[in-house]
Amino acid sequence: MDPRERGEGIGVDARGEDPERLQSAPAPVGAGEGRVRVGTAMDADYLPFHPNPSKPRYTPPPGAVDAHCHVFGPAARFPYAPERKYTPCDAPRERLYALRDFLGFERNVVVQATCHGNDNRALVDALIHSHGRARGVASVGRGVTDAELDALHDAGVRGVRFNFVRRLVDFTPRDVLAEIAARIAPRGWHVVVYFEAQDLPELWDFFTSLPTTVVVDHMGRPDVGQPVDGPGFGLFRRLLAEHRNVWSKVSCPERLSKSGPPGYDDVVPFARRIVEEFPDRVLWGTDWPHPNMKSHMPDDGALVDVIPRIAPTPSLERRLLVDNPMRLYWPEVAAARAYTEAFADIPGTVVFDATQSRLGYGLNQFCMSLMNGENRAAFKADERGYLAGWPMTGEQREAVIARDYNRMLALGGNIYFIAKIGATDGHSFQNLAAKMTGVPEDAYRAMMIAGGRSPRGNRSRSDPSR
Ligand code: 0GY
């Protein structure tokens, strides 16, 4: 059996030899031909996702979220909906997560696509196998039970999607959608809407009556042949300006562009305008696996390289890729982060939170290996050689070689672990702490006996009594 049909052999390690390309065995064009997938085959004119996207030149900030992507099938496990308008190429979660790592993202928001209708099983399967690194937007009908909504929430779903694009779905009465929105609102979920720009006037009243945050897919699909200051895009900007609960995904240049890849130059001014005007209500996503593209299949690496052109400052980038999606999809993590960030301006303090812990995982594992005598001997005999065997950054290795303990803390080291290096060198904890403080050991000892360091001048800069 072809491993692609089992969704296997395409995990994060299945990279080819060219580090500039993600080489995980593509589903070739026409992969559906001649195959029976529970009675369905990929549409003859359907373009499969890019087989080997390039490595982006742009590096997303740590913690970046791809906030619009899909999983399709595999159809053998998760059949496509009978009422679907297209049959795609399977795009299983393993491929999505391999792409996430290759492009330099940390998390995904997986959005239910119409080819799966209201059957969210492939989405839920992707979420529960993401180790907490994916959250989702589901599609539900009026008959959904509270228990089903609970189960979706437990899996990581935080929103529902209402699709108004006529080529993708049949019409659903507005009162049905309003009823669904009223049921999900108390859960803190939001509504994602997908529509064509020409339908915005007719949908305006419905959108503005929704009781939740409303996230618009792909900037409401503007006609980028029109001026960015023209009436069409002006109406969309007015929607965001007048309704602070409305957000926009600045995604899908490949769908909107007339000028095409690699730069998608005609879409850039539209996306940039939205990012600059509404920096705290924008999200970005790859839209992998790019269903229903007809003109071309985008190289996902090239799509990532558009980001710095639409979010041209580090602050805009961070809000677009990290702060905004975290606030909407992982609010509990964002709140914990905001709490620890409040301590970041205390002189000499590095808060060891989940972010630092992830950064320093390899460094701290190396430190713990020094608990073992043979490992200590091996490290002492050849420090660089020994360090090369641990998954650490070059900066972390250099900080260890230099015994720069403060730098190690900044790079994710934990004091309880990095103290093992000091112990290996024959230092007491007191000696180590003195070294980190930059005073002789005697002076450090005297200070501690006298009651420890004075908090004066060492409080948070935001503390008026500092
Ligand atoms: C997208 C866009 C498309 C498809 C869907 O749910 C879907 O089937 O969203 C499209 O064909 O424009 O966001 O993936």
Image (cartoon, rainbow, N blue to C red):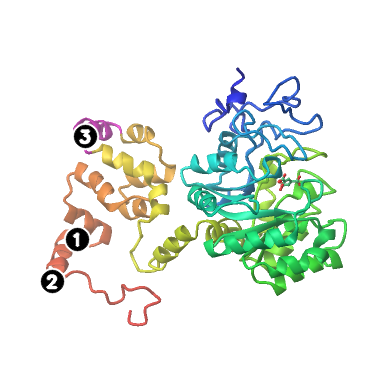
Vertical arrangement, residue 58 with respect to residue 30, above or below: below
Q: Which residue is mark 1?
A: 440
Furthest residue in direction right, as rendered: 226
Q: Is residue 376 magenta?
A: yes
Magenta-highlighted residues: 371-382
The N terminus sits in image quarter: top right
Vertical arrangement, residue 130 with respect to residue 247, above or below: above
> Observer-nearest residue: 15 or 111?
111
Occupied quadrant, residue 289: top right
Q: Is residue 430 left or right of residue 206?
A: left
Q: Is residue 6 magenta?
A: no
The C terminus sits in image quarter: bottom left
Residue 25 image label? none
Residue 113 screen position, x and y as percent: 68, 44
Q: Residue at x 19, y 33 (%)?
A: 373
Q: Amino acid at mark 1?
A: Pro
The answer to whether one can see residue 145 in this image is: yes
Q: Which residue is mark 2?
A: 450
> Observer-nearest residue: 381 or 5?
5
Q: Earlier in the sequence, mark 3 or mark 1?
A: 3
